[in-house]
Amino acid sequence: MKAGIRRPSYVVLALGIAICLFGAFLMVAGEAIVGSDHTGIATVVGIVGIGIIGSSGATIAGARSSSRRTMH
C-alpha cells in the first residue's frame, strides 16, 4: 500500500463539501422544501459542513506531516 494520505480523508472532505452545498441550496430554494423558516436550518447545515471540512483538513495535514517525517 502506498504510504501517505488515505482515501477516507478525501471522502470526508467530499462529504463536507456536499453538505455545504446542500446548505447553500436550502438557503436559496429551501422555502419550498422546509417552509418559511428555512434560513436557520440552512445555516446550521452549512456550519456542520464547514466543521466536517475542517476536520478532514486536519486529518489530511496530519497524514502528510507523518509521511514526510518517515521520508527524512
Image (tube, rainbow, N blue to C red):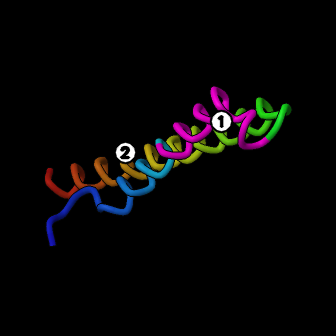
Left or right of 36? Residue 8 is left
Query: Does the magenta run of residues contain 25?
Result: yes
Residue annotated with mark 2: 61
Q: Residue 46's x, y, as percent? A: 63, 36
C-alpha span from label 1 to label 2: 31 Å
- The one nearer the camera, 52 or 60, is 52
User: Residue 10 or 72: which is nearer the viewer?
Assistant: 10
Q: Quadrant of residue 2?
A: bottom left
Magenta segment: 18-34
Examine the image and state in which quarter residue 9 appears: bottom left
- Which residue occupies 42% across, 48% down? 13
Q: Is residue 31 above or below residue 6?
A: above
Question: Residue 51 placed where, x, y %?
Answer: 60, 42
Residue 48 picture quarter: top right
Whole-percent x, y for residue 63 in the image:
33, 54
| Quadrant of image for the N terminus | bottom left
| Extreme residue in the front direction | 32
Give percent across and percent down for residue 25: 58, 34
Question: Where is mark 1, residue-wise?
Answer: 26
Q: Is residue 24 magenta?
A: yes
The answer to whether marks 1 and 2 mark residues whose Cβ atoms lie closer than 8 Å is no
Q: Secondary structure at mark 2?
A: helix
Residue type (three-letter) at the residue carrying disc 1: Leu
In this picture, residue 4 sits left or right of residue 37: left
Residue type at mark 2: give it. Ala
Crowd tier of the residue under label 2, counting other residues whose Cα lies within 10 Å: few below 14, some 14–19, many 20 or above:
some
Question: Which residue appears at 47% of the width and 52% of the height?
Answer: 15
Residue situated furthest top in the rendering: 28
As drawn, 37 above or below 18: above
SS class of the residue under badge 1? helix
Q: Classify mark 1: residues with Cα within 10 Å, few (<14), some (14-19) or many (20+).
A: many
